[in-house]
Image (tube, helix red, strand yellow):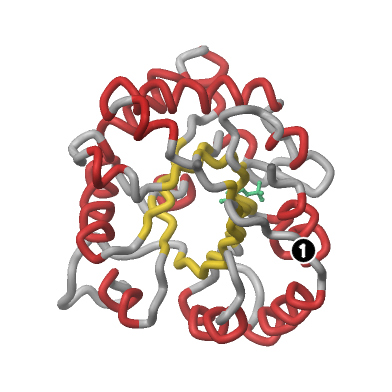
């Protein structure tokens, strides 16, 4: 059975002291993570060690990085390698967030390189995809997202694909307060699953967790997560508030 996941993406927010306080609040707020559920905290690089310390020994909780280099090591000032993350026992990394694609020109091909290094190293990628507003308005979102999947993931073997989590994040819904409706999310998630199924087979596609991201809040999470192919959320703004994020965890199916 595929995992239901509430993933926090803190983005470039919070000072170290604020991060410590948020972890204290999260740990003090009761949540109910069941066996097939997972909470993931994707925090800025300088807070990974803190996150590991605070979350160690907690069942069904994982710490993630928000990005990694497409190079293995060497003279790439300011970059962070997958091997570095692995050596700090970080099991997971977000790859291809739309903000990386847009502000740092990350292409589908570059993301394929990052995916390869993650899988070789045994780190789980959360691969992000999603269309901008003009593509949604033109009604060509399936072609757009299909191409993102093909160019970054379709070179993998079925065995490799099993280690990937997908996050569908329509760009027009990120940080805008404008959520995709549960029906729109379900429609795209079903398309993503069928696209993966056509290439990798039904049983592999059925086991991939596909998260929705874009203005997920405590008060809309349950409705979104109720849909068959929506296996949880990748949460920005609302993950910076402990009570709000715990509501989202508790809304997982
Ligand atoms: P918001 O939840 O702030 O819309 O951000 C979504 C997102 O980009 C998560 O990666």
Judging from the image, what secondary structure is the residue with disc 1 in?
loop
Q: Is residue 178 above or below residue 213?
A: above
**Residue 56 image offset from top left, x and y in percent:** 56, 81
Horizontal arrangement in the rendering, residue 71 relative to residue 218 (left or right): left
Q: In this view, does 27 lie above or below 192?
A: below
Residue 105 visible: no
Q: What is the quadrant of residue 242 in the picture?
A: bottom right
**Residue 89 image offset from top left, x and y in percent:** 39, 78
Which residue is at 52% across, 67% downward?
62
Q: In this view, does 43 lie above or below 18?
A: above
**Residue 185 image offset from top left, x and y in percent:** 61, 27
Which residue is at 38% across, 18% downward?
143
Which residue is at 28% across, 63% downward?
122
Horizontal arrangement in the rendering, residue 227 relative to residue 114 (left or right): right
**How many numbered marks, from 0 up?**
1
The outermost residue toward the top is 139
Residue picked out by circle 1: 31
Task: Give the quarter of the figure containing the C terminus.
Answer: top right
**Residue 159 image offset from top left, x and y in percent:** 24, 44
Which residue is at 27% across, 40% downward?
152
Residue 60 visible: yes
Determine if the C-beta at disc 1 is less than 8 A from ligand 1. no
Q: What is the quadrant of residue 161 in the picture?
A: top left
Q: Which one is nearer the viewer's eye here, 6 or 19?
A: 6
Label 1 environment density (alpha carbons within 10 Å; few <14, some 14–19, many ≥20)? some
Horizontal arrangement in the rendering, residue 71 relative to residue 36 (left or right): left
Q: What is the quadrant of residue 193 in the picture?
A: top left
Q: Which one is nearer the viewer's eye here, 130 or 155?
A: 155
Horizontal arrangement in the rendering, residue 90 relative to residue 106 (left or right): right
């Amino acid at each position: 059975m595929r995992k239901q996941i509430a993933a926090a993406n803190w983005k470039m927010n919070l000072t170290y002291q604020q991060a410590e306080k948020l972890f204290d609040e999260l740990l003090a707020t009761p949540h109910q993570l069941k066996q097939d559920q997972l909470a993931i905290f994707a925090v800025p690089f300088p807070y990974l060690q803190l996150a590991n310390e605070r979350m160690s020994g907690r069942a069904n909780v994982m710490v993630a990085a928000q990005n990694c280099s497409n190079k293995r090591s060497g003279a790439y000032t300011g970059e962070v390698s997958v091997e570095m993350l692995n050596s700090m026992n970080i099991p997971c990394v977000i790859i291809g967030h739309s903000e990386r694609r847009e502000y740092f020109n990350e292409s589908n091909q570059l993301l394929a390189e990052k995916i390869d290094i993650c899988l070789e190293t045994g780190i789980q990628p959360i691969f992000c995809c999603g269309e901008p507003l003009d593509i949604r308005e033109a009604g060509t979102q399936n072609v757009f997202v299909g191409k993102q999947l093909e160019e970054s993931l379709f070179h993998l073997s079925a065995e490799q694909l099993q280690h990937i989590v997908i996050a569908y994040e329509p760009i027009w819904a990120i940080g805008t307060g404008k959520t995709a409706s549960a029906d729109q999310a379900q429609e795209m998630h079903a398309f993503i699953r069928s696209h993966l199924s056509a290439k990798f087979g039904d049983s592999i596609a059925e086991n991939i967790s596909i998260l929705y991201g874009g203005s997920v809040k405590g008060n809309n999470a349950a409705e979104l997560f109720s849909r068959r192919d929506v296996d949880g959320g990748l949460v920005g703004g609302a993950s910076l508030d402990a009570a709000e994020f715990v509501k989202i965890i508790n809304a997982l199916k």
